[in-house]
Image (cartoon, helix red, strand yellow):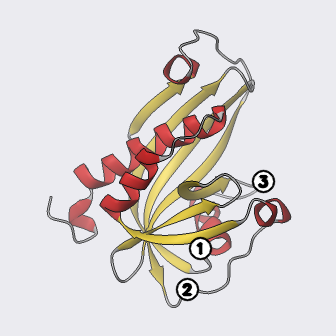
Amino acid sequence: MKHLATITDKDITGSDALSNAASSTSVNAVLFDKNGHIALCYFGKFNFHTIIGGGVEAGEDMITAVKREILEEAGCDCEIVCEIGYTFENRAEHDNTLERYYYIARVCGEKGELQLTEKEISQKVAVCWYPLEQALQIIKENNSLIYQQKFIQKRDIIVLTEVIENHAHLIGGTK
């Protein structure tokens, strides 16, 4: 899978500090519906949007994990279209490292109810559907001062730009 970026505190805060923590693994999907819109997970508590995804659970492979995350956070089944790539994050301030794998997926069937955790409910999580370019603009306009959200914003911009520039032909775009 293509390496899209390594993001460290240097990129976010200017610090040269690095974490030595063991890496965890997460998956995300740029999920398209039949109208060509993509799903963004909206955290109402923080007024913040991000690409759908989450951690890989014990015993899961990447595809199983991304399909589960889509069912939970977008309320639908999906088909995986292709791999996009992966990012590596080293967050010294939180002493954590993270490998995150990205896929393009399409909604299968109807959109249904979200299956949110108590934490997600308390964060007022919702799914919002936007044209790809508008989704990228919304992510770029996130003006969070929160350390973790700055990492999320940076990687989401990288991934959505990659989709627009190199995968648009797979989802009906012009490139």
The outermost residue toward the left is 174
Of the residues under marks 3 and 2, which one precedes in the sequence? Answer: 3
Q: CA distance from mark 1 to mark 2?
A: 7 Å
**Residue 47, x across and y down, in percent:** 61, 55
Q: Which residue is mark 1?
A: 74
For the residue marked with disc 3, what is the amino acid? Ala
Give the number of the disc on residue 111.
Answer: 2
The residue under the point 63% across, 70% down is: 126
Tell me: residue 11, above or below residue 70.
above
For the residue marked with disc 2, what is the amino acid? Lys
Look at the image and tell me in which quarter the C terminus lies. bottom left
Element class at badge 2:
loop
The outermost residue toward the bottom is 110
Q: CA distance from mark 1 to mark 3?
A: 22 Å
Q: Which residue is mark 3?
A: 58
* Residue 111 appears in the picture as rendered: yes
Of the residues under marks 1 and 2, which one precedes in the sequence? Answer: 1
The residue under the point 75% across, 57% down is: 59
For the residue marked with disc 1, what is the amino acid? Ala
Tell me: residue 78, above or below residue 3.
below
Q: CA distance from mark 3 to mark 2?
A: 27 Å
Label 1 close to label 2 by CB (< 8 Å): yes
